[in-house]
Image (cartoon, grey):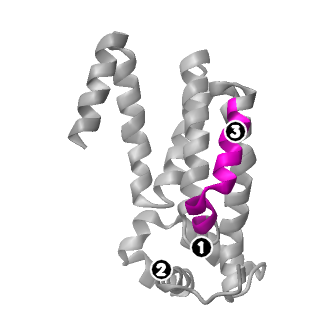
Amino acid sequence: IGDWALWVDEAFTWRDATMPLEQFVKADRVWYSLPFHLLRGLLRLGWIGEDPTSLRLPFLIVGALTVPLVALCGRRLVGAWPALLAAWLLALHPWHVFWSQSARGYSLVVASAVLAANRADAFFHDRRWRDLFLLGIVLVVAGTSHPTAWLLAVALVGFVALRRVPRWRAGWVAVLLLAGC
């Protein structure tokens, strides 16, 4: 992960993580500030340096941990073997590998999406408020990692809405929504 220089978005990540906090708060990235604050904290603690390898390492760790997370969380949704297959496919997925090696917050979004699906399923199955609370935390972590992650909340609302529609209608609604995209 240190064999190549920072590309432009990673350079912006470094800039935002090292700029004065007062200046950062005025920037538009304050709305998805978690990756920058994560790096800022690790830099201040002296746990990482400002070289490309150090800046990429936290995101690589999150990306690598997402693979077994898919296997563990997927078991609840689809069973052990399909969950292992999904984890294996994620481990080999070129975009997951690429973004996990970049100093950007996308690996945090993927990990949050996996946890969000797990907690949403747990809540709808067991109706424990703890699961709903954890789902909310995970959605905030995702949304503060990158703005596109707020689409997870939109998908959750769509899922809840479609659960109330009879199955044959839900299929047609999903087809129409996909056709509209």
According to the picture, the residue beneath numbered tag 1 turns out to be: 102
Tell me the crowding category of disc 3: few under 14, some 14 to 19, or many 20 or more residues within 10 angstroms, Cα based: some
Q: Residue sitting at 56 percent across and 84 percent down?
A: 14
74 up-or-down from 93: above or below: above
Q: Residue sitting at 69 percent across and 54 percent down?
A: 91
* Disc sitting over residue 9 in the figure: 2
41 up-or-down from 141: above or below: below
CA distance separating discs 2 and 3: 32 Å
Most foreground residue, 122 or 129: 122
Marked residue nearer the N-terminal end (2 or 1): 2
Q: Residue sitting at 63 percent across and 75 percent down?
A: 39
The answer to the question of whether label 2 and label 3 lie on touching residues, with beta carbons closer than 8 A, is no
* Disc sitting over residue 73 in the figure: none
Q: Secondary structure at mark 3?
A: helix
The answer to the question of whether label 2 and label 1 lie on touching residues, with beta carbons closer than 8 A, is yes
Q: Residue sitting at 42 percent across and 34 percent down?
A: 156
- Which stretch did the figure color magenta? 82-99
Can you tell which of label 2 and label 3 is closer to the viewer? 3
- Residue 72, located in which quarter of the rendered image? top right
- Residue 105, located in which quarter of the rendered image? bottom right
Q: Secondary structure at mark 2?
A: helix
Residue 94 drawn in magenta: yes
| Viewport quadrant of the N terminus | bottom right
Residue 26, image x, y percentages: 37, 78
Residue 86, image x, y percentages: 65, 40
Numbered marks: total? 3
Residue 59, image x, y percentages: 65, 67
Tell me the crowding category of disc 1: few under 14, some 14 to 19, or many 20 or more residues within 10 angstroms, Cα based: many
Q: Tag 3: residue type? A: Leu
According to the picture, the residue beneath numbered tag 3 turns out to be: 85
Q: Tag 1: residue type? A: Ser
